[in-house]
Amino acid sequence: MRRALRLLPLPLSIAVCLPAMADDKPLNWGLCPASDVIPAFTDAPTPVPGQDKAAASAAREQQPTDIEGDQLLGTTTVPQYEGNVALRRGDQFVGTDKLSFDTESGNYIADGNVRYQDASIRMVAKRAEGNQESDTHKITDIQYQLVSRRGNGDAESVDLQGAVGQMHRSTYTTCDPSQPVWKLSAPQIEVDNDEGFGTARNAVLRIGKVPVLWAPYFKFPIDDRRKTGLLFPQLGMSGRNGFDYTQPIYLNLAPNYDDTLMPRYMSRRGLMLDNEFRYLYNGGRGELLTAYIPNDKLRDRDRGRVMFSGYHNVDSHWQARANLAWVSDERYVEDFANRLVGVTASNLQSTVGLYGTGQNWTAGIMADRWQLTDYTLNESALAYNRQPRLYFNWDKPVLSWLETGVYAEAVRFTHEDINFKYGPEAGPDLEYTRTGQTQRMYGGARLDVKPYVSLPFSGAAWYVTPTLAYRYTAYDLDRQLADSIRRNVLVSQGVDPATATPEQLRGNTSPSRSLPIGSIDAGLFFDRETTIGGRSFLHTLEPRLFYLRTPYRNQDELPIFDTRDFTFSWGQLFRDSRYTGADRQNDANQLTMALGTRFIDQTTGRERFSAAIGQIQYFDESRVTAVPGGPPVEKGKSAWIADANYMVNDRWTLSATYQWDPKYKREDLASFRARYLMPNDGVVNLTYRHRINPDGTDLLKQADLSFLYPLNPRWSLVGRYYYSLEDKKPLEIIGGVQWDSCCLAVRAVARRYVRNREGELNNSIQLEFVLKGLSSLGQDTDRTLRRAILGYNRDDLYLVPPSNTGTTRDDYDPNLIP
């Protein structure tokens, strides 16, 4: 009788096939009725907690089939069970009023109140019959429910021969039958369980009673195996692109690589072909993105892009990585970016290299190249290409009080030639077009070595870390670059290059710089227990001193390849250089004084309040500048830097950063952030930012308000108002409404945002239907809202965002001494 259970997987051909994709935002099933569509059968085996479908299927293969019934009639070859017939095998259960089975022919009939249940599905039917020898089965008048996916539906009949089955007049939904918000139905669905896919013909998706999507023919997966076929389309409307329709086509080329073809029609531009190719193997993975639009009607030219990212693990220590990017023109990123960062991006970087890491070392050899993506600039705005770059970093604690290490880098710098452009004064016909004049750019090579010795002494409430480093930097420059630097030095000294001698004009092609760098970092930790408002807190007081001494070296004849001033911030108070690269090392005789404090809740361990303030005292004037003749850092005090964070309660969080320059009596930076977490996943964010340029003019002054406001369990409002007070115009405005039901969510979002460098605004409308447990129709509004509203997906608040500044383990920066 074991083989009689072969009919049991039949309803799965409907049940597991139609739920194709899950939404990124966690689905809210709280609005659904608590009762099951088909209640669990009381005489069925109890599911094992936490056991999935695959584990349950594997477990049942080794178990026998048990059959029970109130009466056993018939003959030995054709037994008949009547009354409360139950078949059990592992997690599987079949119940019926009457079961007869011919052991010689293999024919069986289950008649009346047929019930089936396993770890993933429950089903009821009127009748089931078939033949075990020919493996043919027919089930009529079916209702089913998916246990974990909340899917349910019905079918008029199911015919199965072996692994191939047909459903007739079948439906699928994740809604409760009392609230049929949406339903997918098809007069015929063919399923091949061996191949793992189903084919629906004349399928219709209805929202309420209104048909919104008809597909004469489509394939879909019925298990975890990927299948070639159509994905759900994306629809949108914007002032820049017009009507925007994308139809993704998924191609399952092999188990370890696939391709998604995305034809995209934009009524104002034309047809674009996007493509995403992915591959995966034991030693690495990669992704290739391409796009091509022939004769963009707005630009009257062919356009496209190519992007690749991937890695290959050579062994346990070494990894090869590549991140390559190319676009056809300087307006491409701006035209096809939906984020403000895309509008303001002025370049693309491509990098390829071999990177290694060990217990005490990191090393690598790489090369990169920059491409201009800002039509208002020329190639002088690009950074130097590093072709190639080698680096090696090593640090090791020798004793508990002795640590030593070395940072080393060798790099060859090249640069794209400058192609000059007409300015706005040339008129609209010539503005930002190339003049035909070019300027050759020259480069050179640089070696930078920085060994150091550190003595970290510490106790339970104190630490003192003296560090002594020696930095040697040498160059091999192209003659033309060396001569150009020399001319700039003469100008800074008040010498007219036209009257200078050939010897004075001849630059040094092999300049070098060497100097010691000494620092002492010391701090204390005080703490006490205190009570505020009846709550117990641990209160800390953390003073810190950082002294830096570096002698002056004239560096005017050194080039500037990859070096710039750090933005003054809290981290700069404790660095041994105010420059990001090796082309400049500032002289210093300075002392940083800082004080921090924290209040830690003794009950929960949460940091309820933290604050810190610091300032640098310059004992001598710092004479090294990025350009010859530039203004030095004067003797005296730097700006005060203060930072505070206050968790008022579990819902309110306030934070602020402030910089005040006592010399000019002005604020250099002010940033205020407030967040309120509402019940029911609501959130409100308010941010204000103000930063000035070194000359005292405003660099930016912005206010940013964003929110997700639930009106009730079904309706919520979303919005963002991002405004530039300096420019007196909005940067981005988002307004939208969300409606949520048991099994359907609808998001409608209107967006107005800066679309180009002239500050022109673009309007767009995004509409998305989220069919819970199936997929979504329309544009990806979830991605737009998660970017614009921090906390839109509550889990995002607890993720550490990737840093946009600083260094990574494979990136060399000798200014960051441990």
Image (cartoon, rainbow, N blue to C red):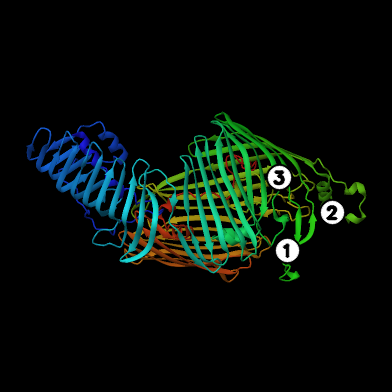
Where residue 422 appears, x then y in whole percent? 75, 65
Answer with the quarter of the image where residue 375 lies.
bottom right
Q: Is residue 631 left or right of residue 17?
A: right
**Which residue has dot 1 on it?**
433
Where residue 654 appears, x then y in whole percent? 45, 59
**Which residue has dot 2 on it?**
493
- Asked whether the viewer can see residue 722, the reply is no
Front residue of 322 and 87: 87
Within-10-Å neighbours for mark 3: few <14, some 14–19, many 20+: many
Mark 2–mark 1 Cα distance, whole angstroms, equals: 37 Å
- Nearer mark to the viewer, of 2 and 1: 1
Where residue 359 appears, x then y in whole percent? 55, 31
Quadrant where the C terminus lies?
A: top right
User: Judging from the image, what secondary structure is the residue with disc 3 in?
Assistant: loop
Q: Is residue 431 above or below residue 56?
A: below
Choose the circle earlier in sequence order: 2 or 3: 2
Q: Residue at the far front: name it.
A: 105
**Which residue has dot 3 on it?**
585
Q: Is residue 29 left or right of residue 500?
A: left
Quadrant where the N terminus lies?
A: top left
Front residue of 17 and 751: 17
- Nearer mark to the viewer, of 1 and 3: 1
- Asked whether the viewer can see residue 775, the reply is yes
Residue type at numbered disc 2: Gln
Residue type at numbered disc 3: Gln
Q: Is residue 88 left or right of residue 396?
A: left
Q: Is residue 404 left or right of residue 789?
A: right
Choose the circle earlier in sequence order: 2 or 1: 1
User: Judging from the image, what secondary structure is the residue with disc 2 in?
Assistant: loop
Residue type at numbered disc 1: Thr
Where residue 447 appears, x then y in whole percent? 72, 38
